[in-house]
Amino acid sequence: MMPLCTLEEAEEYSIKVIPHDKLSVLAACHARGIQKDKDDLRIQSLGKAVRVLETDKTDSTILCRVPTVGDIWFALEAVAHLRPRPAQDMVYLDRCSVQR
């Protein structure tokens, strides 16, 4: 999965995915100041396609609608593009690390 690097990539109503890596997702959310009280819902969201509802530029968080789970806030780093990374786009990870 190709992680998001900027909030601009999280366009409202676009479809993204929450990666399967529980520890990385929760660590990214906690690092952005998101409270742990809804971590059980974040864990239920792992591997699911989500719809972006809103972004918060003050803390780089994204409100996502997760089917059968609800509306949950995630850190930018805890959300990825739904489509797999194209082979010709292997420089993408370098671009992300430059922008952070």
Image: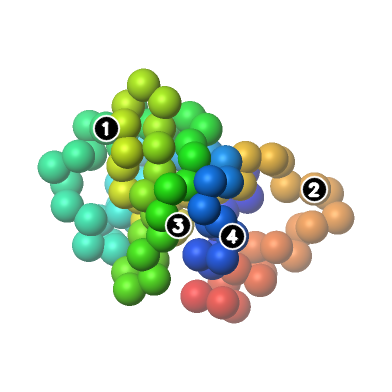
Dots 2, 1 in contact, CB < 8 A: no
Q: Nearer the viewer, mark 3 or mark 1?
A: 1
Residue at 69% x, 40% y is 83
In the rendering, at what x and y percent does residue 58 appear? 33, 73
Dots 2, 3 in contact, CB < 8 A: no
In the rendering, at what x and y percent does residue 64 appear? 40, 43
Comes first in the chain, label 4 or label 3: 4
Callout 3 secondary element: helix
Callout 4 secondary element: helix
| The disc label shown at residue 86, or none | 2
How many discs appear? 4
Q: Nearer the viewer, mark 1 or mark 4?
A: 4
Neighbours of disc 1 within 10 Å: few (<14), some (14-19), many (20+) = some
How far apart marks 4 and 2 lie (CA) works out to 16 Å
Q: Amino acid at mark 4?
A: Glu
How far apart marks 3 and 1 lie (CA) works out to 17 Å
Comes first in the chain, label 3 or label 1: 1
Return the residue at label 3. Answer: 77
Q: Amino acid at mark 1?
A: Leu
Neighbours of disc 2 within 10 Å: few (<14), some (14-19), many (20+) = few
Return the residue at label 1. Answer: 41
87 or 6: nearer the eye? 6
